[in-house]
Image: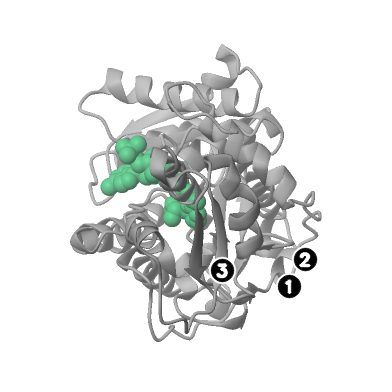
Amino acid sequence: MGSGAGPGEDLLVTGGSGFLGSHLVVDWLRRHPQARVACLVRAPDDVTAVLRLRTALLRAAADSGQEVGPALLSRAAVLRGELGEEGWIDAAAGWAAEGGGRAVRVLHCAASLSFRPEDREAVRRINIDGTRSLLAAAARLQAAEFNYVTTAYGAGDRAGDVGEDEVCRPDGFSNGYEESKWDAEAVVREACPRALTGRGMGYRILRPSIIIGHSTTHRLSSSSGFYNVVQTIFQLGRVQRHQGQLILLPLPPDATLDLIPVDVVVAEMIHLLDAGDATLDHAFHLTSDGPLSMIEVLARLSPMAGFSIDRQDEAAAEVSRLARMLLQRLRHYTPYLGQIRRFDRSNVRAAGVARQPPLDVERLRDFVRGFIDRPNQGMVAR
Ligand SMILES: NC(=O)c1ccc[n+]([C@@H]2O[C@H](COP(=O)([O-])OP(=O)(O)OC[C@H]3O[C@@H](n4cnc5c(N)ncnc54)[C@H](OP(=O)(O)O)[C@@H]3O)[C@@H](O)[C@H]2O)c1
């Protein structure tokens, strides 16, 4: 990776009303006291758009146990609109011009995260066509960089070591979301040929694994991914006759679970953006430095829900009725229970990103408790 001065600190962000995007915006503004951010926000009118963004930013700040004042919030502008539309681009150009001619950087975090087969077309429209239209808008705004937040699971069915800059399309994917993210990465690389030509907009491809709550407060303003699995397990445990049962799941013994707290993933993203040109035109696995054993997580945490989970041989002829019920309820997530691969982090290391605080199963218990015990959750961890 080369070196050089980066552009200014002003960011045009999509997905700022969402979980990761709101944390990113708050942290970016906190760490860059002169920076401005403009967020693309979906809403029926301007007042609602402002309210939606403000609520999301305040929630993200609360997740991290800090307060944000009006001075910080005033540096977050709202562009009302959505991916695929062009109506907001003039307002974005006006916002960029107010920055005194500094080049803008785009951080594209918005996406549909639906795994449901029936949403496949909508997911592709938002994640691929939406990315393509944002790239065109970024070119019109003469953005210096396009930072694309995607997912490590765009690696689809790839097993073993997965490199960051590999561009070979996987043979298969667990769902349309993974596939759309891989295809959108290809769209980004193609639209940003700076690596080949030395000119134009540079890119970064930022690939988190599974994002969990804040590493010190354990709070989070989302309930997707890992927490959907936790919620399903706790719901099963609320049924009296399931209490004290042992559920054997057919899982590979060496399956891993790759989790990253939201503040850690945001810190890594900011480090990479702050590194300037040195980190352009590469992909980065924003994954765990030490993935957990899936079976250890399930075995040690399931008693919090009132029953026990352990593994049985994948080739076992009999799977219990309760195990089948759990797997059916987790059907969108079962591909993630048997993952055996390692996301290589050579580019992350080369960029000088600090080693993550270790996350073990005992610490994960605090994240689960933070989610289950949160107000309105209606479930109590043991
Ligand atoms: N959460 C994870 O564990 C995880 C893991 C790996 C990668 N990621 C990636 O991280 C990014 C953010 O995920 P998240 O967990 O923060 O999801 P999220 O909370 O669902 O946020 C998604 C954001 O995208 C916006 N959005 C969706 N469709 C849009 C459209 N057509 N036009 C404009 N905005 C649109 C949403 O706006 P509304 O508020 O209007 O709905 C929301 O702000 C995604 O790219 C995802 O693939 C997430």
> Which label was assigned to residue 346?
1
Q: Residues within 10 Å of mark 3 (few under 14, many from 20)?
A: some
Task: Name the residue tied to disc 2.
Answer: 349
Q: Is residue 91 above or below residue 171?
A: above
Is residue 303 found left or right of 319 in the rendered image?
A: right
Name which residue lies at 44% across and 83% down.
170
- Dividing the picture into quadrants, the one containing residue 2 is bottom right
Q: Are marks 1 and 2 in contact (CB under 8 Å)?
A: yes
**Left or right of 285, for residue 242:** left
Location of residue 306 in the rendering, given as x and y in whole percent from the top left corner = 53, 42
Which mark is first along the chain, 2 or 3? 3
Q: Which mark is nearer the camera, 1 or 3?
A: 3
Label 3 to label 2, Cα distance in Å?
Answer: 34 Å
Disc 3: which residue: 311
Residue 269 at x, y = what percent?
63, 51
Badge 2 marks a residue whose secondary structure is: helix
* N-terminal label among 1 and 3: 3
Can you say whether 369 is above or below 346 in the image? above
Check whether the beta carbons of the residues at disc 3 and disc 2 lie within 8 A of each other.
no
Q: Secondary structure at mark 3?
A: strand
Does the residue at mark 1 contact the one at mark 3 (Cβ under 8 Å)?
no
| Label 1, label 3: how far apart the Cα atoms are | 33 Å
Estimate how packed mark 2 is, as few (under 14), some (14 to 19) or many (20 or more) residues with alpha carbons within 10 Å: few
